Image: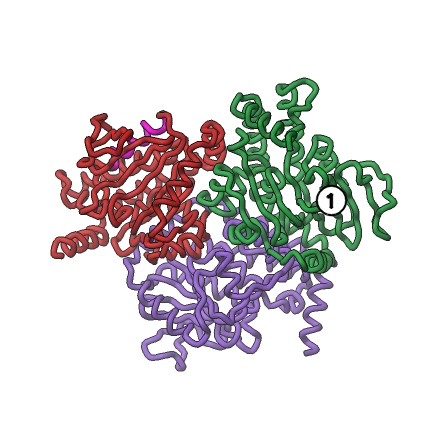
Chain colours: A purple, B green, C red
Amino acid sequence: PSSEASSQGEPGVHEKVPESEGIVVTSEDGITKITFNRPTKKNAITFQMYNQIIEALKTASTDNSAITVFTGNGDYYSSGNDLTNFTSAAGGMEEAAKTGAVVLRNFVNSFIDFPKPLIAVVNGPAVGISVTLLGMFDAVYASDKATFHTPFSSLGQTPEACSSYTFPKIMGPAKATEMLIFGKKLTAKEAWAQGLVTEVFPESTFQQEVWTKLKRYAKLPPNAMRISKELIRKSEKEKLYAVNAEECTTLQSKWLTEECINAIMSFVSRKAKL
Amino acid sequence: PSSEASSQGEPGVHEKVPESEGIVVTSEDGITKITFNRPTKKNAITFQMYNQIIEALKTASTDNSAITVFTGNGDYYSSGNDLTNFTSAAGGMEEAAKTGAVVLRNFVNSFIDFPKPLIAVVNGPAVGISVTLLGMFDAVYASDKATFHTPFSSLGQTPEACSSYTFPKIMGPAKATEMLIFGKKLTAKEAWAQGLVTEVFPESTFQQEVWTKLKRYAKLPPNAMRISKELIRKSEKEKLYAVNAEECTTLQSKWLTEECINAIMSFVSRKAKL
Amino acid sequence: PSSEASSQGEPGVHEKVPESEGIVVTSEDGITKITFNRPTKKNAITFQMYNQIIEALKTASTDNSAITVFTGNGDYYSSGNDLTNFTSAAGGMEEAAKTGAVVLRNFVNSFIDFPKPLIAVVNGPAVGISVTLLGMFDAVYASDKATFHTPFSSLGQTPEACSSYTFPKIMGPAKATEMLIFGKKLTAKEAWAQGLVTEVFPESTFQQEVWTKLKRYAKLPPNAMRISKELIRKSEKEKLYAVNAEECTTLQSKWLTEECINAIMSFVSRKAKL
């Protein structure tokens, strides 16, 4: 990310990316915070934002913060992949599918490789890849107004971000399938009971309780935390790379099927009419 | 299965196996339904029924249904393996153990290989292999009068259907052992809390709620669902084949031990006296 | 362990180790019981006790008991590794770290290899390695006054006893990290909800309910139980050896870092002042 500082930043906060770019990165109190900042589009993620996040994680992995946190600005955490990434692509769907698969694979690998504790502060609804990625996080704190929705089948798509591996591992196949294949939307409480969410807080005290906790965690010995995470991740790192590659290859072909193109076109035109 | 249609079928339903044979297969609304249909024997599974199910899954994997559902006719879902499979075998226990291991291995492999979403509608008590198999299903809906019981140790037997792998993965060893080794019988609510069951419904509305849901799921794009399942299954398919082989080899020797023969004889003669 | 019988033993109980040695082993009703018996030190585990437990497990694996049980004498289950193992070591920290890594690896391997159902009766607070080891047990029964605490990061340390593998597998990364990296202390109820504990009992009836249950389990056919456990363990035994080796190597270097030495010194001197 560029290192321009935004003048709207809180005192003492060094903002590495201007707000207009969709992702805002700040760092203070030992915490690097990466914010989805496209509230008028429910924080849908554009190609540019995927690349910004890859860069932000690269920087955060060696900065002097102890932990890294994702959150969303506004009502949504993130509505997931911006489907206009496909419909507005210059070279048409085939080119978009090829680019999309490369970007997605690099993006997910940057989460597999991230060396410090990675925490999601889920402030509102999460959809698609913003949900599946949670399987790669070390802790997930959610407001009770958050929801978790992966409507892949109805969009003619298939799971990504290693969720075809992490979700069954976390919650068992009987619950993972209902989310990943049948598209059941979960409440925060349900996501907690299924092990996807670490803890749920009432919306009214969410921000205060979570940030108090995170500031405390950020003061723990950083090397011990990094090495513990390395131990935990090591036993499945190769598996995660392989699953990510497989999911991206699958999606690249899936995106070019009539089933998928029709579903995306219908979704985008429905949204355009609203 | 033979393709004789039963005259008792619901309108529009093509029944591929006559009811008298123990397994009934029907297909409508994008759903292939395989029913344990031996209600006077609590749907205990005979050698013939294992083979019928293998055939039914083969057919369902290429028919035009989107999802496949197992359920039971009558009060029970299924009381599991019919122990008279052993005591009534022509060549004695040794021959029965050999045949049993081959049938079991093929039977379980046909679940490992099944390519479409596979759902259990557990209408009542489930025992033995009808429980362990649930670890291979993609969703499990249960009536609140269902129970889940795997009394292997008291019958001198050991787990099958890959449950020695899937159960610890789903619920952790501390809860898997209580079922698989100590034979604890679970309520539907407990099985749900442990991740074995997707959702529990009151008996009074069970059939209506579940079938409404399943008819909705069966309308989702079938290719996306099939490919999502393939992704989820792929990362552990080789493991499942290996575990299945190991469990069958183990059971084949176990069935010939005095500990097991005595336990089975005592069980069968106790039942005969009732 | 030596085979001196203690004169304080209950009638019929053969105590293989005198109480003064820190570990007491008794065997009756098909149950071998290994008790942490250093109540004035909250059952903290010394180097000597690690070696006693290795021996006790070796003996229990071939004695005529059906199941083996760990529990604690007094208010605590166990406060974990006795940190004076380091500060009081003759050759200084480097020697202590080397010895510690060897003892730890052998100790954990003896749990990986233990062939019979292994059950923890958690009578009170459990800390550190007495918690992480629970991931290797087949069942864990806890009093409602038990707690589960692994404050590794604040002591500059990292997880052991294969918990970097078993905990994420049991409860998912979002809950495992909060314990293993952020040091969250769990209540018995929370540990149960996360799958680490099989069942929680009110303190007032804990001992009676648990031992009634265990005596019943100990009467099940022992071979079937042993072979079922072998099946369950087999599919991850190599993984567990590798994770154990990795964790011990990691701890051996970690113990020599300033971050860790300072944390341990500060902990020990704080305790000494109380």
Report the number of numbered marks: 1
Vertical side of C79 occupied by C3: above or below: above
- The residue under the point 36% across, 56% down is C186
Q: Is residue B226 magenta?
A: no
User: For the magenta stretch, what is the residue range?
Assistant: C50-62
Q: Which residue is mark 1?
A: B34
Height in image: A125 above or below C23? below
Front residue of this view, candidates A46 and B128: B128
Q: Position of residue B56 (x, y in %)?
A: 75, 40
Query: SS at mark 1?
Result: strand
Task: Indicate the position of residue C151 as horizontal and vertical percent values.
Answer: 29, 54
Q: Amino acid at mark 1?
A: Ile
Above or below residue C24? Residue C143 is below
- Of residues A18 and C1, the one drawn nearer to the viewer in this rendering: C1
Q: Magenta residues: mostly which secondary structure? A: helix
Give residue C192's position: percent from left, percent from top. Answer: 42, 52
- The residue closer to the viewer here, B9 or C111, is B9
- Does residue A233 show up? no
